[in-house]
Amino acid sequence: MPRESILPVALDEEASPLKLLVIDDDALTRAAVQRYARSHGLLCESFADPVEALAELDEVAPDVIMTDYNMPGMDGLSLLQAVLQRDPEMPVILMSGIGDFQLAVTALKAGAFDLLVKPFESPELAIFQVVRAARQRRLRRRNHMLEREVVSRFRFGELIGESPAMAPVYRFIERVARTQAPVLVLGESGTGKELVARAIHHNSRRADLRLVTVNCAAIPRDLIESELFGHVRGAFTGAAAARAGLFEAADKGTIFLDELGELPLPAQAQLLRTLQQGEIRRVGSDETKVVDTRIIAATNAELEQRIESGEFRKDLFYRLNVFTVHLPPLRERGRDVLLLARYFLERLEVRTGEAKTLSADAENALLAHDWPGNVRELENAIERAHTFSEGSVIEAAQLPSAPHETSTTRLRVLSPSVEFAPLAAAPPSGGELDPRIASELLDLPYAEAKRRLLAIFDGTYGHALLQRTGGNLTEAARLAGLDRSNFRRVIKKTKRDTPSGVPES
């Protein structure tokens, strides 16, 4: 019967007792550790041969491994590396008859939970380290399960979020999915507009039929009508044979037109005909064909402004604007950032076999970041951090909003030129803004002044990148870490918001 246990109370409540695996070619050490472990209620198995122990590892399924450092056939460090390759979260405690500081450093760097010198000064403390290691492992497993449960509870299709900003989006999808009417999804680039389209389609009566996705901005303007509506033979140079368009491919199903604001006017006229009469006309043909295709369109452009400038048809906008949903940017979704980050980590764990979690500082960094590229930017940031982080915990330093960076860049707005200067330990004396700009900002309420100042940053940063790339918008967007349409939106927005004291270019 086990004597009074030193196990923490939380572990006494576990459904199954902890299991320790001891690997040591010394029979006396194996027997002693087994006796200590069993006296405190732990299950314990032991092996003299590390190679045999490794072969039986899945069968034994321990919570913790204790292994000697010096053994014939395979030393403790080699065994540690082999174990961690199979299970990165398995706690391994090394034992050595020599209290060598350098060995301890090497063991810990290699991923060991601890290094214990034998004979043990205090068997009780040795077993306590075993218990502590097992407790951490089980808590991590429990956290993974809870995170998966949280993600599954707060998702709609592929959309994930529990914030109040997402609640009306979920209600909207549920209601419009049952209808056949066109849907317009508005939101910044990277917010998940295509995921909304998928959720609507997969919850509609057309769910078993095809969903065709079209990025209108990715198709050359002179080919967009042919891609969408098809063409007849000889309709244009290179049209050697007749070809059906994407609307015909989506017949009886759904077509998702992303970046609708980029659609040229002739294609807009064709789309209006399809919406009004349910028919399409191939390029170069006088004949029409009836199609039953539900249309879901999305854009990050301000369509009202494009209507005013003559770039978008007003009648098409009104026809599409039957059911409209605004997808909130990630910066307005609060702790959804953490839900999404954990979801992306779970997907990476499935793909790579490496389980990683976020430290508290990393979570704070994620919450503090503005995420101009929205969910797409967050996904990319998590994948980079997962790739480059060492160990199983991602720290704030691997994320874009690390608060403790010492080498940052400050943008100084100096009329009439823009200068990028390294930030010293203390800011230089003197105003950071041209006096005219500062005076104008001080006449505004705080929120409006902040918005204008951010517009100054967007404008000066964006135009400086354009200057660097010789006006190449695609390359400038790549350097900024944004997609082309989102970068262009930032540039265009600054033309409206920039204070009069700042030149637009």
Image: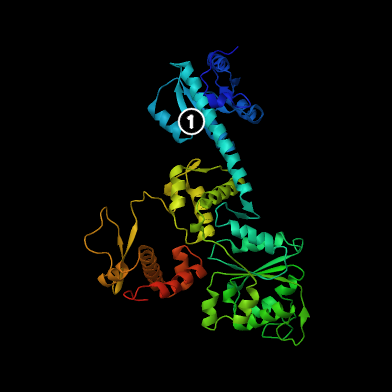
At label 1, the amino acid type is: Phe
In this view, 46 is above or below 261: above
Residue under circle 1? 113
Q: Is residue 99 left or right of residue 136?
A: left
In this view, 241 is above or below 330: below
Q: Is residue 394 left or right of residue 23?
A: left
In this view, 39 is above or below 356: above
Q: Position of residue 26 (x, y in %)?
A: 54, 16
- Other-residue count near label 1 (Cα within 10 Å), few / some / many at <14 / 14–19 / ≥20: many
Quarter where residue 497 is shown: bottom left
Residue in the foreground of this view, choosing between 51 and 143: 143
Residue located farthest toward the bottom when viewing the structure as drawn: 286
Q: Residue at x 49, y 35 (%)?
A: 111
Res 68 visible: no
Res 238 visible: yes
Q: Residue at x 48, y 16 (%)?
A: 123
Q: Secondary structure at mark 1?
A: loop
Placement of the C terminus among the 4 image quadrants: bottom left
